[in-house]
Image: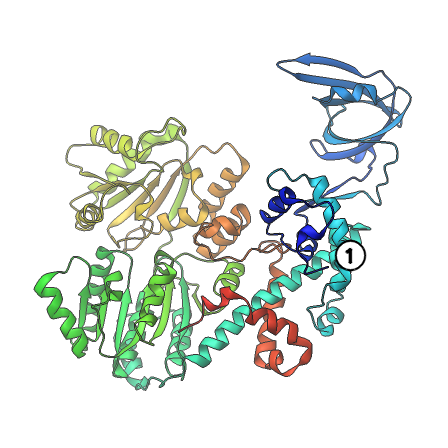
């Protein structure tokens, strides 16, 4: 029955079949793996142990006739008094007037709902007869779609359990069941749908949490190993003493983190397989210097390097800084969309002939007419700003360079292991010596006058400021500050010799570039902007970041915005204007003022927002697990990753028959093909 279409079940007609298809249930066996997303626990507790506002289950004797009153349109309130031990409490039922005939004075009833400790009152959402048995009453709650009711779905799952549970195959080798004391797959499926006790449910969840994470990590390691074997090539040959000589001439010492990461990258460049590495580093941690040294090593090996960034002005800044860094050692050229005509043609010819050692540019680097002579290393900065297809285009053109992705968005370890599990990950987790931490303050709207005075004083000291707003124009739906209004207010309120600029997402690319260039050249003293500056130009002279309605931003975004300042030698400040109503907003503000560590903040952000919202659901690339939770189950993820690495290292998928089912599952997954190098 397991592989039979779902309409072989007698009660499933055409309409029910269509409803089940909405849940991706097409076969009888699919019902077994449509697991509950939560459980309602009906556990009787003494009243004095129930917390205020807690959902509770209470059993008591009805000591008054139920009274029904009506209000509004078709709305009702039913109230009766229950004797619970020596305490009389009120049970309130909204819009359940029909229960008046079922609740009899003198009977014992059981109710579940929200407990009001101060009024000795429970607002009931579930009513049970006196046959309530708390040992068996753990109720699974399922996702449904369309007109399919939970009751119908439970009946179908019960049918599938009786007819097909014996066909569920074990996926895990005995070693894991024994070592981690996990139940078998059939027992775990049964206990997830019809738990006999809390303990049985706990172990069933443990089993599937491990299975899901282990299989996913095996897929990541399989991709990693496959790509490594498929991209065999000549290792880069370069004189390490020349690299060290270049490092010593930089004029400053690398941090321990930079040294460690550089060693990992240079080791990769020497290997006979293609580097596929993610370099994480907080804002200002010195990723670009490490990238420059890697490009220099590539040049010494006789190959070209490319640095791809998301915006033209950022490309120009990188080209200037690399030219200054390398001097006459090698040739750096810029390639962006605005370089056209004869100039572009000449530059492309020089790149193709190998006369350019390092090319810095935007997505213009991956256009069809850009042909490299011998591309050895590609560095993609702010990699999340480029789509998967854009990042693959270099491979599609027949080039097989080493690839280094860089990001200044600190990614929690859990998401790093999951999203980038098929890559090697390097982390720069310390700031260069002498870098002053940004002072961060949380203030309310009534202090705006003082904030403006501070802005003026910074500008008159030769510095610049950013002012960030969530919206471009006024919105009827959201009572929050907007960029256009703030821009106009500051123009009116600040001295005439202070130039205020405006930037937002509705400007076209050229207009944005022009505004940012004027700000970088200090023609604009205060830049009012939406979050389009979150990842952008380097303005070392900017020392003040003011963020309106800061409670509307996530911690990672606030940290990125704060990172726009503090890039020069002057003390910098970040002022969060916020009046959060809820505990979550207040917690964000508190954490922001207490730490400048992006990785600490990212862990907090993950706990507050969840993994789906951390990257943005559409582009996250995160897997969807039925039981596992990336935030709660991070320890299991670490164990699963360690075990997956062991399996690949010892080639158990190929050498041990117990792993055959896992191997078949991995090889048949179409999503794996998307992440394999051509």
Q: Kindly tell me whether residue 119 is visible in this rendering.
A: no
Q: Quadrant of residue 450?
A: top left
Q: Which residue is mark 1?
A: 163
Residue 536 position in % (x across, y down): 29, 53
Left of 61 or right of it: where is 145? left
Q: Quadrant of residue 261?
A: bottom left
How crowded pointer 1 is (Cα within 10 Å; few <14, some 14-19, many 20+) is rated as: some
Residue 165 position in % (x across, y down): 76, 59
Please name the residue shown 71% across and 41% down the image. Answer: 152
- Say if 274 sits above or below 94 in the image: below
**Along the viewing direction, whichever of 260 and 339 lies nearer the viewer:** 339
**Along the viewing direction, whichever of 436 and 597 lies nearer the viewer:** 597
Image quadrant where one finds the C terminus: bottom left
Q: In the structure shown, which secondary structural element does the residue marked by tag 1 occupy?
A: helix
Residue 567 position in % (x across, y down): 30, 55
Left of 489 or right of it: where is 653? right
């Amino acid at each position: 029955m397991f592989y039979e279409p779902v309409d072989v079940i007698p009660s499933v007609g055409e309409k029910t079949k269509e409803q089940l298809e909405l849940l991706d249930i097409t076969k009888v066996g699919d019902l077994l793996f449509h697991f509950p997303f939560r459980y309602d626990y009906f556990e009787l507790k003494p009243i004095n142990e129930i917390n205020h506002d807690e959902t509770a289950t209470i059993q008591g004797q009805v000591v008054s006739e139920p009274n029904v009153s009506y209000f509004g349109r078709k709305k009702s309130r039913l109230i009766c008094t229950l004797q619970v031990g020596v305490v009389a409490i009120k049970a309130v039922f909204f819009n359940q007037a029909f229960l008046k005939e079922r609740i009899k004075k003198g009977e014992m009833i059981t109710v579940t709902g929200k407990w009001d400790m101060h009024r000795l009152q429970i607002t009931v959402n579930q009513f049970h007869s006196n046959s309530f048995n708390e040992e068996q009453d753990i109720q699974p709650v399922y996702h449904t779609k369309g007109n399919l009711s939970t009751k119908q779905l439970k009946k179908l799952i019960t049918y599938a359990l009786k007819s097909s549970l014996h066909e569920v195959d074990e996926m895990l080798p005995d070693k894991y069941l024994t070592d981690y004391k996990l139940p078998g797959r059939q027992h775990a499926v049964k206990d997830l749908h019809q738990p006999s006790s809390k303990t049985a449910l706990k172990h069933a969840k443990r089993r599937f949490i491990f299975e899901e994470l282990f299989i996913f990590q095996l897929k990541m390691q399989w991709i990693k190993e496959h790509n490594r074997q498929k991209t065999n090539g000549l290792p880069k040959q370069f004189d390490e003493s020349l690299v060290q000589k270049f490092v010593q001439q930089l004029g400053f010492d690398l941090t321990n983190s930079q040294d460690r990461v550089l060693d990992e990258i240079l080791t990769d460049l020497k290997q006979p397989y293609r580097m596929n590495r993610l370099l994480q580093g907080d804002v200002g941690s010195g990723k670009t210097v490490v990238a420059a040294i890697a490009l220099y090593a590539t040049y010494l090996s006789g190959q070209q390097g490319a640095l791809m960034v998301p915006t033209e002005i950022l490309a120009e800044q990188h080209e200037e800084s690399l030219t200054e860094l390398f001097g006459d050692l090698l040739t750096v050229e810029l390639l962006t969309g605005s370089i056209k005509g004869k100039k572009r043609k000449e530059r492309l010819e020089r790149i193709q002939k190998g006369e350019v050692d390092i090319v810095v540019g935007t997505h213009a680097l991956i256009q069809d007419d850009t042909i490299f002579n011998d591309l050895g290393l590609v560095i993609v900065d702010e990699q999340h700003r480029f789509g998967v297809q854009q990042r693959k285009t270099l491979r599609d053109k027949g080039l097989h360079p080493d690839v280094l992705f860089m990001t200044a968005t600190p990614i929690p370890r859990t998401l790093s292991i999951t999203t980038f599990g098929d890559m090697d990950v390097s982390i720069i987790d310390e700031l260069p010596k002498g870098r002053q931490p940004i002072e961060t303050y949380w203030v309310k709207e009534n202090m705006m006058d003082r904030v403006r005075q501070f802005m003026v004083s910074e500008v008159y000291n030769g510095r610049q400021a950013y002012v960030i707003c969530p919206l471009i124009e006024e919105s009827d739906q959201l009572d929050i500050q907007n960029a256009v209004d703030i821009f106009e207010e500051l123009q009116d309120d600040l001295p005439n010799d202070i130039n205020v600029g405006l930037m937002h997402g509705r400007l076209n690319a050229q207009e944005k570039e022009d505004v940012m260039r004027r700000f970088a050249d200090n023609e604009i003293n205060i830049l009012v902007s939406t979050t389009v500056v979150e990842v952008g130009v380097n303005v070392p002279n900017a020392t003040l970041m003011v963020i309106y309605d800061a409670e509307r931003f996530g911690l990672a975004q606030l940290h990125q915005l704060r990172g726009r300042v503090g890039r020069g030698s002057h003390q910098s400040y970040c002022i969060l204007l916020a009046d959060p109503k809820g505990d979550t907003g207040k917690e964000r503000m508190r954490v922001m003022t207490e730490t400048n560590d992006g990785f600490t903040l990212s862990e907090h952000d993950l706990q507050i927002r969840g993994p789906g919202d951390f990257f943005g659901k559409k582009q996250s690339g995160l897997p969807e697990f039925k039981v596992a939770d990336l935030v709660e189950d991070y320890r299991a993820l670490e164990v699963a990753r360690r075990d997956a690495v062991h399996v690949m290292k010892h080639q158990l998928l190929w050498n041990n028959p117990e792993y055959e089912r896992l191997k078949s599952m991995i090889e048949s997954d179409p999503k794996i093909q998307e992440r394999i190098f051509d």
